[in-house]
Amino acid sequence: LPIYSGQDPSWQPVIYTADLLIPVVNLGQDGLWRASGASAWVASALTAVGWLLLSTGAAGATRILTRR
């Protein structure tokens, strides 16, 4: 469901998923849509996985940079 009733945004599932998975970049989709029910749990899980991937990537980059 769109959050703002005055707008008519188009649903972009791939961009919405990427917006949830990449927590430091705002693609503008997660602020336009409100997940409810099971979709809210999936959205929360995607956000948690995104933060996990970000922290894992940062730890790996730190290890590579300190090794040299």
Image: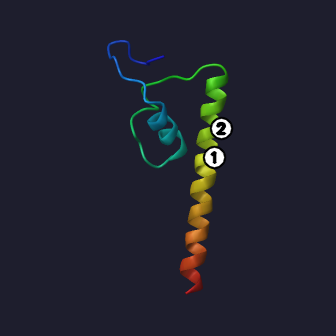
The quadrant where residue 55 appears: bottom right
Taking the spot 63% from the left edge, 52% from the top edge, the residue there is 52
Considering every residue shown, the one lying at the far bottom of the view is 68
> Left or right: 3 with respect to 40?
left
> Left or right: 8 with respect to 35?
left
The quadrant where residue 54 appears: bottom right
Percent x, y of residue 9: 35, 22
C-alpha distance separating marks 1 and 2: 6 Å
Give the amino acid type for the residue marked by disc 2 in the picture. Ala
Taking the spot 59% from the left edge, 84% from the top edge, the residue there is 67
Relative height, residue 3 to residue 48 (above, below): above
Residue pointed to by mark 2: 45
Q: Quadrant of the C terminus?
A: bottom right
Taking the spot 55% from the left edge, 71% from the top edge, the residue there is 61
> Left or right: 51 with respect to 13?
right
Percent x, y of residue 56: 62, 61
The quadrant where residue 21 appears: top right
- Mark identifier at residue 49: 1
Percent x, y of residue 50: 58, 47
CB-based contact (under 8 Å), mark 1 and mark 2? yes
How packed mark 1 is, by other alpha carbons closer than 10 Å (few <14, some 14-19, many 20 or more), is some
What number of labels is visible? 2
Relative height, residue 37 to residue 27 (above, below): above
> Left or right: 21 with respect to 3?
right
Q: Could you say whether the residue bearing mark 1 is in a helix, strand or loop?
A: helix
Taking the spot 66% from the left edge, 29% from the top edge, the residue there is 41
How packed mark 2 is, by other alpha carbons closer than 10 Å (few <14, some 14-19, many 20 or more), is some
Relative height, residue 37 to residue 45 (above, below): above
Q: Could you say whether the residue bearing mark 2 is in a helix, strand or loop?
A: helix
Give the amino acid type for the residue marked by disc 1 in the picture. Val
